[in-house]
Image: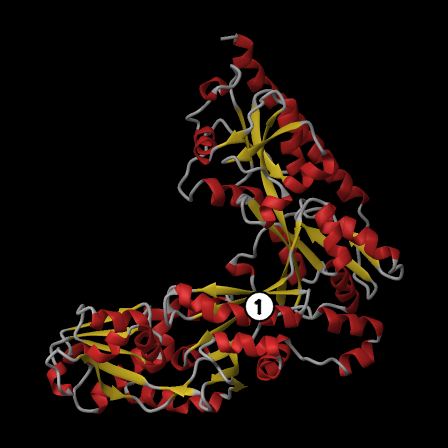
Amino acid sequence: MNVSNRIIPGFFIVIIVILLLFVSSCDSQKESEEAKPAVATENRILISGASSVMPLLKSLSHEFLKDNSGIEIVFLPDARSGAGIAGVADGQYDIGAVSREMFFEEKSDDLQYLHLAIDGMVMATNSGIKIASLSRALIRDIYAGKVTNWAQVGGPDGKISVIDRPEYSSAKIAFRATFLDDDFKVTPASVPLERHWQVVDSIQMIPFSIGYTSLGEIIRENPKLNIAAVNRVSPTPENLKKGRYAFFRPFGLVLKAEPKTEVMQFLNFIFSKKGANIISRSGYLPQRYEILVGIVPERNVIVQEQRYQPLINYLSQRLGKGFSVKLKLSPSYLDVCNGLVAGDLDAAFIGSLAYVAVRKHVNALVRPEFNGKSSYKGLIFTRQDSGIENLAQMRGKHLVMGGGVTSAGYLFPSYFFPHEGFGKIADFFSETSILGTHEDAIMAVYNRSAEVGAAKDLVFDMVANENPMLRDQMKILVQSPSLLSNVFVLRKNLKNSCFECHHRISRDPVAGRTGCFRAGLGGMLKSYLLNMHENPEGRAALDAMLNTDRFIDALPLDYSNITEMLTEINLDPEDLLQTGK
C-alpha cells in the first residue's frame, strides 16, 4: 500500500476544514458587519432561516419582484431552521425558511407551515472515486467505520475520509432517517461540517472522501464530484417524483397565521405555475399545500382506501392547484384521534365517540347520509352454534370489541351491560379484548376466537354481503339505539394560506376581505362536501363510499346521546386518549 494514500487524506482534511471554517467565520463576520438593521414595514418582507433554502427563495423572489417593484424582499443573514421558526414567532421575520418539518415543541396556533419543495439528497465522493452505486449496507458500514479503505469494496487503495453533518442539521436528520437509526454510532474519525457548501468543497478537495449534500445544489452549481446512485437508483428529480428515490428532505416556509398582504402576494407567486416551474428548474420537486385526512380503520386498509380515495381525489381537484389532499390510513382509532390532537392530521372521518373525545381540537363539518338516514347501530352478536341464547349466558365468555375509541364497538357494550344490571364488562366477561377494526371483531367471533363480539352494523352488513355464510352462522342478540354516522372533522387551529383570497386581498385590501368567500379552509371543504352529490364526479365518489346519498350538516348538539352514555358509566372520553384504550 502506498503510504501517501494513508497520510494525505488525513493531512488534507485537517488543513482544508480549518480553512473552510476560517472562511465561514469571516463570511459570518462580514455579513454581521455589513447587514443593516432590517425594520419590518408594510411593503418589506424579511426572510431568514435555513441556508440551504435561501438560493431557491432568492430565485423565486428575483422573478416575483419583476412585476412587484413596490415590494422589497430583504434576506437577512442565514441561520438554521430553528432560528427561522423562532424569528417568525418573535416577529423578527415575515418568513422563516426551514429544511425540515417543525418539531412538536415549535408548533403553535400562531404559526403555519407551508410545504415548499422536496430537496433530494445525494451521496457524493471525490471525483477520483468512480463508484457508480452505493448500497444502504455499504453506506452504514462506511459511516460506522467498518469499511475504511476503498480497496475493501473494489475501489482504489486509499483511506476513506468521512464527511458528516451535525446531528441538529436537516441533512443529518434526513441521512439518519434514511440509512441509520437512532442508536447508530457514526465513526469518531468522521468530520461534521456546518454548511452544505463546506461539504461540497471538502469532497472536491479531499482525496478518497465521501459525504452527502443537496441535489438542488448539485444541479445549480455542477461541482466536480462523483454522484453515486443508492441501491442502483439514481438521485434525479424524476425518481423523486415517482417515489423511487428515498433520500430527501422537505423545504418549507413558516409564517404567521395571518400574514400581511405583501407576504400573501409572494406566496401566491411561489405556489403558482410560474413559481412551480422555477422550483423544478432549480432541481427541486415543487409541492402544493397539503391537507392530510385520516381515516379510521372500520375495515382493513385496502378496503378503506378503495372507499375513500375517490373522495380525496375529488376534494383535491375542487380545491385546485394550490392544494393537495392526501389520505392517511391509520392502524387504530386511537392513532387518528391522537393525530388530530397533535396536529399530525389536518382532518379526518371519525366516529361519534372519537369526535366527542377530540371535540376541543376539531370542528365537525359534515356526516354522510345512507338511504335517507345518517345513523348506524351497534351490535352484540355471537355464533348460532355458541349455545348462547340470552345475555345471562354470556357471563364468563370472551368479548371482543371493534376498536377502542368507537361508539358501536366500545362505548355501547361498556354502557349496555351495566345499564341492564350485569355490571361492568370487565367483571361480567372472563376476558375482554379491543381489536383494531370492527371487521376484526366480527371475524374473531366467526372464526371461534371469541364467543361474543361488538361492532358496527354497517360493517357487519358489508362483511356478510361479501360472505353470505357468515350471516347464516351468526346471531345478533342486541342492537343499540341509533348512533350518528361518522363525521368529517377539521382541526380548529389549522392554518393555511388561501391563495386566491390572498390574491384578491392584495389587489383590493378592503373589498378583498369583505368579499372573501371563506373565513377558513373549513368553509370551502364544507361547501364542496355538501354539494358534491349534484355533479357527476362527486356522485361517483359518493357511490364508492358504500353508495352514500350525500353529506349533510353536522352539529355538535347531535351527539348528546353519546355524552349521556359516557355520563352514566362515569367515563371521561379524553381518558380514552390517555389510557390508549
In the image, is residue 370 above or below residue 581? Answer: below
Among the 4 quarters of the image, the one containing residue 7: top right
Residue 464 point in image, percent of width and height: 30, 76
In the image, is residue 94 above or below residue 186? Answer: below
Instruction: Please identify the residue farthest to the front as the structure is shown.
Output: 468
Instruction: Please identify the residue farthest to the top as the structure is shown.
Output: 2
In the displayed structure image, the side of residue 503 where residue 85 appears, left or right: left
In the image, is residue 262 above or below residue 353? Answer: above
Residue 484 point in image, percent of width and height: 42, 86
Among the 4 quarters of the image, the one containing residue 247: top right
Residue type, label 1: Asn
State the residue at coordinates (32%, 74%): 463
Residue annotated with mark 1 = 313
Frontmost residue, 536 versus 125: 536
Look at the image and tell me whether residue 403 can be seen: no
State the residue at coordinates (48%, 45%): 177
In the displayed structure image, the side of residue 176 where residue 315 appears, left or right: right
Secondary structure type for disc 1? helix
State the residue at coordinates (62%, 70%): 495
